[in-house]
Image: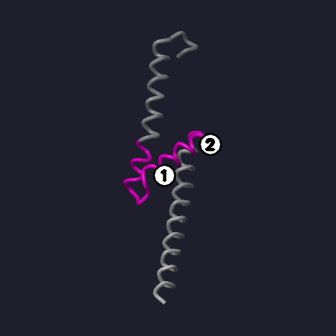
Amino acid sequence: MATQGHPGMTLFLAIYGTGILIGEAILKPLLIAKSGKLPFLVLFLGVIGGMAAWGFTGMFKGAIIVAVFYTVFNSWLLRKDAAHASHAAE
């Protein structure tokens, strides 16, 4: 639109697109967090970090990578606590 001489429509599309991107960056982690056991902040940081690193596809890559590491870390902590509890019982 800008190259065709429509400054009003150009401004509208820029504001609209920015609003959509911000809304998506906030709503996506909220909706993913409700569907699983991951905290909102963990997914939000994954989405934002992924977007910063890889652009649009990074939203998905970042969320997946952070979710996997969060799950692995929590399972490691649970095993460590279980092992510690079994040694304390002996």
> As drawn, is 3 to the left or to the right of 19?
right
Q: Amino acid at mark 2?
A: Ala
Mark closest to the chain's N terminus, 2 or 1: 1
Residue at position x 56%, y 40% in the image: 56
Q: Amino acid at mark 1?
A: Val
The single residue placed furthest to the left in the displayed view is: 34
Residue 80 against residue 43 in the figure, above or below: below
The single residue placed furthest to the bottom in the displayed view is: 90
In this rendered view, identify the residue nearer to me: 12 or 65.
65
Residue at position x 44%, y 26% in the image: 16
Residue 81 against residue 47 in the figure, above or below: below
- What mark, if any, has residue 42 been given in the picture? 1
- What mark, if any, has residue 89 been given in the picture? none
In this rendered view, identify the residue nearer to me: 23 or 40.
40
Residue at position x 43%, y 41% in the image: 26
Label 2: which secondary element: helix
Magenta-colored stretch includes residue 4: no
Alpha-carbon distance for marks 2 and 1? 16 Å
**For the residue carrying disc 1, how many other residues have a C-alpha within 10 Å: few (<14), some (14-19), or many (20+)?**
some
Residue 20 against residue 32 in the figure, above or below: above
The single residue placed furthest to the right in the displayed view is: 53
Residue under pointer 2: 53
| Magenta stretch, overall SS | helix
**For the residue carrying disc 2, how many other residues have a C-alpha within 10 Å: few (<14), some (14-19), or many (20+)?**
some
| Nearer the camera: disc 2 or disc 1 | 1
Residue range corresponding to the magenta coloring: 27-56
Q: How many marks?
A: 2
Magenta-colored stretch includes residue 32: yes
Colour scheme: one colour
Label 1: which secondary element: helix
